[in-house]
């Protein structure tokens, strides 16, 4: 009887451990998007750190945080004074994500900068990066690296 119970426990543990892997594989097969995940970059315009979270496949939702958002104000030397947080959504079509986002400046008091800032990202499979959104004054493209 003890062996029977031990055998059942082994099966339960194996099913519990393997189920998340099977679910993840199924998601990649049908609803998975190369855009989904966490991304980080350094702003090509002002050098600030940026973080981007994307979820969803056909219709993607994203949350963006810029630790030094020039659009929210700069000091006399042109350095960003405030961070900003943005929330939006867009459509994934192959290796392109197009959409818009609302931008809130985290100044004191915080303020809504815009409700419809455009977003355009391209996924590059060869190095698992995103490019786009904007370019520097010299034409250098914004590059996002996956963090998870």
Image (cartoon, rainbow, N blue to C red):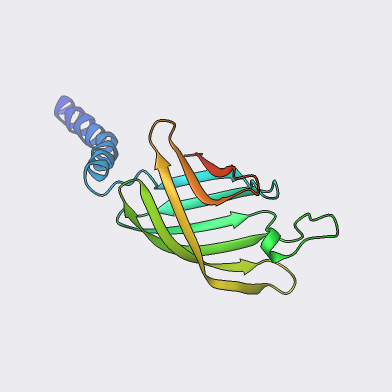
On the picture, is 43 further left or further right than 148? right
Which quadrant: the N terminus? top left
On the picture, is 74 further left or further right than 97? right
On the picture, is 140 further left or further right than 78? left
The quadrant where residue 91 appears: bottom left
- Position of residue 95 relative to residue 2, above or below, is below
- Position of residue 94 relative to residue 85, above or below, is above
- Position of residue 5 relative to residue 20, above or below, is above
The quadrant where residue 142 appears: top right
User: What residue appears at the point 28 percent right and 36 percent down from the top-left corner?
Assistant: 21
User: What residue appears at the point 54 percent right and 42 percent down from the top-left corner?
Assistant: 143
User: What residue appears at the point 22 percent right and 36 percent down from the top-left corner?
Assistant: 15
- Position of residue 131 relative to residue 54, above or below, is above
Residue 146 in the image, given as x and y percentages of width and height: 48, 39
Q: How many discs appear?
A: 0
Residue ranking furthest to the top? 3
In-front residue for pair 108/119: 119
The quadrant where residue 24 appears: top left
On the picture, is 76 further left or further right than 15? right
Residue 72 in the image, given as x and y percentages of width and height: 69, 65
Residue ranking furthest to the right? 76
Residue 103 in the image, given as x and y percentages of width and height: 58, 67
In-front residue for pair 54/95: 95
User: What residue appears at the point 50 percent right and 58 percent down from the top-left corner?
Assistant: 63
């Amino acid at each position: 009887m003890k062996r029977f119970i031990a055998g059942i426990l082994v099966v339960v543990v194996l099913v519990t451990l393997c189920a998340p892997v099977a679910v993840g594989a199924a998601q990649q097969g049908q609803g998975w998007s190369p855009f989904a995940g966490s991304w980080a970059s350094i702003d090509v315009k002002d050098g600030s750190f940026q973080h981007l979270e994307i979820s969803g496949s056909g219709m993607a939702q994203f949350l963006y945080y810029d630790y030094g958002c020039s659009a929210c104000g700069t000091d006399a030397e042109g350095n960003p004074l405030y961070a900003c947080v943005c929330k939006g959504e867009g459509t994934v079509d192959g290796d392109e994500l197009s959409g818009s986002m609302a931008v809130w400046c985290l100044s004191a008091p915080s303020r809504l900068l815009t409700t419809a800032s455009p977003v355009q990202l391209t996924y590059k499979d060869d190095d698992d990066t995103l490019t786009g959104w904007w370019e520097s004054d010299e034409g250098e493209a914004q590059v996002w690296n996956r963090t998870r």
